[in-house]
């Protein structure tokens, strides 16, 4: 009888421990998150929940908790689609279940995430412009949020309006930038160009600029998309003569990143670029690694339930903010506000000789 009791005790401990490795994830993110979990910890079980219709979300989350979810991934928040995340966050707060976002949350709806601050790229570009002592720039953008980043850049730089000027050029929808490039070359007559558009469009923009003889030692492009550093631009015909500066969250040439790339290839189905690790993949890996490590660090004796305050949730949250992490996106530090702080952006510059 004593042996049976011991067996049942061990079984219950193992069961409660394993049941702690379950995470509630928005159903539309399952295909993206599974390859990352293959790399971080393949033993973690994903419990999907639907975010439409909104009135069903509470029951969806409660079902996930009933199935043993010990943490929740928020739905992505963007303009016109913030209600779902707000509902999930509210349920998580009321039940004390750890809740994190894999995406950068807007300032109006802050959430726990590992992305650098919203204006990190803007500060980096402003610092670069000041270091180079540029007196004028052209800023290329397409969407409203890209314009906001540009505005942050100009504000963060505290540029003297008497000695610095910027011209904004908004791209029309489509993939032909000939008119905008002619405007920059012939009417604005400026050679330092900040490009704040998604990577595929930025590369296309550079290719068309090169075709219009807007490369060489005279022109210099600063690309704000942080995945340009993962592209082998030296092998791309047409833009090999362009001066280009960009930024990244890690050193794509380091031995550490190369070792991580080999590990990712060995363990998961994540698709990697020519070098480094994509920005979003880096953030997702670091977020899930820290979350799962925090969950593993405590014994979960009971599962969370809707309507109750889950005591173990406080221990997991504490570990999340206290556990040091040397991540792919850099060393992790937290500000008192709960935001990531002291992050590093690496500057990559390809400059042609005079």
Image (cartoon, helix red, strand yellow):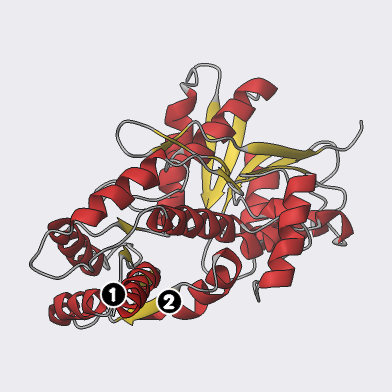
Q: How many angstroms separate mark 2 from mark 1 (CA)?
A: 10 Å
Q: Is residue 160 left or right of residue 65?
A: right
Q: Is residue 229 left or right of residue 172?
A: right
Q: Which mark is residue 68?
A: 1
Q: Secondary structure at mark 2?
A: strand
Please name whichever residue, 283 or 44, is drawn nearer the observer in this view of the structure: 44
Please name whichever residue, 32 or 306, is drawn nearer the observer in this view of the structure: 306
Q: The N terminus lies in which quarter of the figure?
A: bottom left
Please name whichever residue, 125 or 187, is drawn nearer the observer in this view of the structure: 125
Q: Are marks 2 and 1 in contact (CB under 8 Å)?
A: yes
Q: Is residue 307 visible?
A: yes
Q: Residue 312 appears in which quarter of the rendering?
A: bottom left
Q: Is residue 148 left or right of residue 94?
A: right
- The crowding category of the residue bearing disc 1, from other C-alpha atoms within 10 Å (few below 14, some 14 to 19, many at least 20), is many
Q: Is residue 111 visible?
A: no
Q: Which residue is mark 2?
A: 45
Q: Secondary structure at mark 1?
A: loop
- The crowding category of the residue bearing disc 2, from other C-alpha atoms within 10 Å (few below 14, some 14 to 19, many at least 20), is some
Q: The C terminus lies in which quarter of the figure?
A: top right
On the image, the x and y values in percent for residue 295 come to: 38, 58
The answer to which of marks 2 and 1 sits earlier in the sequence is 2
On the image, the x and y values in percent for residue 186 come to: 69, 45
Query: Which residue is at a point 66% across and 21% down the rendered structure image?
Result: 131
């Amino acid at each position: 009888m004593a042996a049976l009791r011991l067996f049942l005790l061990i079984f219950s401990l193992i069961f409660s421990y394993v049941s702690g490795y379950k995470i509630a994830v928005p159903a539309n993110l399952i295909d993206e998150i599974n390859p990352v979990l293959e790399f971080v910890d393949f033993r973690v079980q994903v419990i999907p929940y639907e975010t439409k219709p909104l009135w069903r979300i509470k029951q969806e989350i409660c079902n996930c908790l009933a199935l043993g979810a010990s943490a929740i991934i928020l739905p992505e928040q963007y303009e016109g689609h913030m209600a779902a995340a707000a509902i999930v966050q509210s349920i998580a707060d009321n039940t004390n279940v750890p809740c994190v976002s894999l995406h950068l949350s807007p300032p109006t709806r802050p959430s726990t995430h590992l992305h650098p601050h919203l204006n990190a790229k803007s500060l980096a570009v402003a610092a670069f412009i000041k270091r180079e002592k540029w007196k004028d720039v052209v800023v290329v953008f397409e969407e409203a949020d890209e314009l906001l980043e540009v505005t942050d850049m100009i504000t963060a730089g505290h540029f003297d309006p008497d000695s610095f000027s910027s011209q904004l050029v908004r791209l029309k929808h489509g993939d032909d930038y000939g008119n905008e490039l002619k405007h920059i070359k012939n009417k604005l007559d400026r050679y330092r160009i900040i490009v704040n558009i998604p990577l595929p469009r930025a590369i296309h923009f550079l290719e068309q600029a090169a075709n219009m003889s807007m490369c060489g030692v005279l022109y210099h492009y600063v690309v704000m998309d942080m995945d340009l550093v993962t592209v082998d631009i030296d092998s791309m015909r047409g833009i090999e003569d362009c001066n280009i500066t960009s930024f990244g969250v890690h050193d794509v040439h380091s031995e550490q990143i190369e070792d991580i790339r080999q590990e990712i290839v060995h363990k998961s189905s994540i698709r990697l670029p020519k070098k480094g690790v994509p920005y979003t993949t880096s953030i997702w890996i670091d977020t899930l690694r820290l979350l799962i490590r925090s969950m593993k660090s405590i014994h979960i004796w009971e599962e969370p339930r809707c309507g109750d305050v889950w005591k173990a949730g406080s221990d997991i949250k504490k570990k999340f903010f206290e556990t040091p992490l040397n991540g792919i996106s850099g060393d992790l530090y937290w500000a008192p506000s709960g935001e990531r702080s002291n992050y590093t952006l690496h500057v990559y510059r390809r400059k042609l000789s005079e």
